[in-house]
Amino acid sequence: MFITRGRTVGFIQLGPKTLGEAVIEALAEPGRRLVYYAPDGSQFYLEASAVTAACVAVTPQEVVRGEECLELLARRSGDQQGVIEVVELSEQQIALDVSSRPDSVIPGGLEKVRSVFAKHRQEEARTETAQRTAPSGEARVPETAGPATGEETETTPVAEPAPGPSGPPAGAAAGAGTEAVELSPAGAGEAWRDILRVRGLRLSGTFNVLAVAALAVMGREVDVRTGSKSCIDVLDDVLSLRRRLTMRCRGEGGEVYIYVDPGAGRIEAYYMEAGRAFLGAEALRRASRLRATEVKVYIDAGQGSQGG
């Protein structure tokens, strides 16, 4: 969401540590970008230097920037699921990000970020105290922006999820009043079905952010030539490695994230464009029409090739 690229210095897996605690801890030093991969499919990009701060959020419903983004993120400060990527940036990089996205600026900078999170943590503490001291039957559970759950199906577009048991990070349920996302007609961009069938892979309706984050840090990057291929064609080439892997493919107007575990016969897909997000079959349909301009692939460095 920001134009500069820094160096990933680590990941923070939430639980029992809360999001608010992790943010305050990670921002003890300026010059950081935090990317929060929420279980509902939302992604929050928060970065701060000694003099400025900026925030962009991509949720299944919208893209939010600046102070509104910060408030939305801080309301989740009690979250104990998801993962935070910590990226090291120079002050010059953050200044460039801010100049390219002035609507993402948070007036008050790093101190404002800390104060907003501190305020929400205090409010949560007061709510917990009130619940513990309220007479039996009178305690009221406040509304939270906690993770939604999704049933594992072949296709689970984020705006129309099916209810089900909790599991790995899944697509978000759309809130009341959310405009339905128009899906591609059946038959459009269906070549991926044959690719998965030949490879013996089953498409999941969830997306395991934690596994992707771990591979990006611990795995080995593989050089991939895109040519004029679509992201699905690139995926077909990559699957010949027969390794557990993650792939990010960007194109004009969108990007797709893929996680593949051949040993489990499983593939997961998450697609984003213009603030909208899609999982499963719809993610792969859209990726079929996405011309690859940038591809990153990481494979499990400790796994040997599997026969097939």
Image: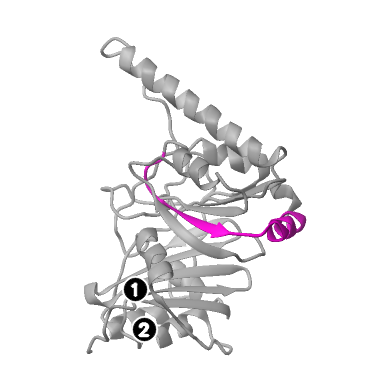
In the image: residue 144, left or right of residue 294: left
Instruction: Report the front residue among 172 and 301.
Output: 301
Instruction: Report the front residue among 279 and 64.
Output: 64
Is residue 73 shown in magenta? no
Q: Residue at x 50, y 79 (%)?
A: 231
Q: Which badge, 1 or 2, is on the more N-terminal residue?
A: 2
- Is 76 rendered above or below residue 270? above
Q: Name the residue under label 2.
A: 239
Q: What element carries label 2?
A: helix
Q: Position of residue 210 (x, y in %)?
A: 37, 59
In the image: residue 89, left or right of residue 280: right
Label pair 1/2, CB-CB below 8 angstroms? yes
Q: Residue at x 26, y 12 (%)?
A: 136
Q: Is mark 1 on a helix, strand or loop?
A: strand
Check residue 66 in the rendering and tell me which mark sits there, or answer none. Answer: none
Is residue 84 shown in magenta? yes
Q: Where is residue 36 in the image (x, y as percent from the top left)?
A: 49, 51
The part of the chain drawn in magenta is 79-100
Q: In which quarter of the image is residue 252?
A: bottom right
Q: Which residue is drawn at 69% across and 61% down?
A: 93
Check residue 260 in the rendering and tell me which mark sits there, or answer none. Answer: 1
Amino acid residing under circle 1:
Val
